[in-house]
Amino acid sequence: MEITSQPGAFESREFHTSLMSCFDDVGVCFCGLFCLPCLGCSIAKDMNECCLCGLGMPIRSVYRTKYNIQGSMCNDWLIMNFCLTCAACQLKRDINIRKSNGTLKP
């Protein structure tokens, strides 16, 4: 028997919302705009990480790897350095969606 494709669990995916979909969840957007450190702590808590880890390329890369989301560490670095608020909001929206559909991994 020859294996010709990977199981579905290994297919690469994308984030549930785009980087600029801020109005998909206005509450997350306002939190990101007015208290980015609070949003960072919320994301870290959801990912069982230390709040002091803050927001940056590593936390986005860990999340992408955990859920097999397309991208690269270089892309993560660029996004987190030039679009930090939008990237943090995108990450939190994705976490909230995974919480609501029961696919958030501990």
Image (cartoon, rainbow, N blue to C red):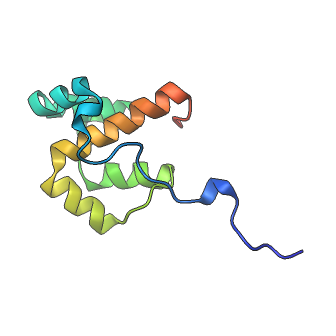
Residue in view at x 70 percent, y 59 percent: 7
Q: Position of residue 102 (x, y in %)?
A: 56, 29
Position of 36 with respect to 44 (left or right) is left
**Residue with the most extreme left position:** 34
Is 80 left, or right, of 67 in this rendering?
A: left
Where in the figure is residue 37, as x and y percent of width and height? 16, 33
Report x, y in % for residue 70: 43, 60
Of residues 60 and 3, the one drawn nearer to the viewer in this rendering: 3
Residue positioned 33% across, 41% down in the render: 91
Asked where in the image residue 92 lies, by quadrant, the reply is top left
On screen, residue 17 versus residue 54, left or right, reads: right
Toward which corner of the image does residue 8 lie, by quadrant? bottom right
Figure quadrant of residue 78: bottom left
Q: Nearer the viewer, residue 52 or 15?
A: 15
Which quadrant: the N terminus?
bottom right
Residue 80 spot, x, y in % from top left? 21, 54
* Frontmost residue, 21 versus 48: 21
Residue at the outermost right position: 1
| Residue 61 to residue 72: above or below | above
| Residue shown at 68% from the left, 65% from the top | 6
How many callouts does the rendering have?
Answer: 0
Residue 21 visible (yes or no): yes
Can residue 48 be seen in the rendering of this structure? no
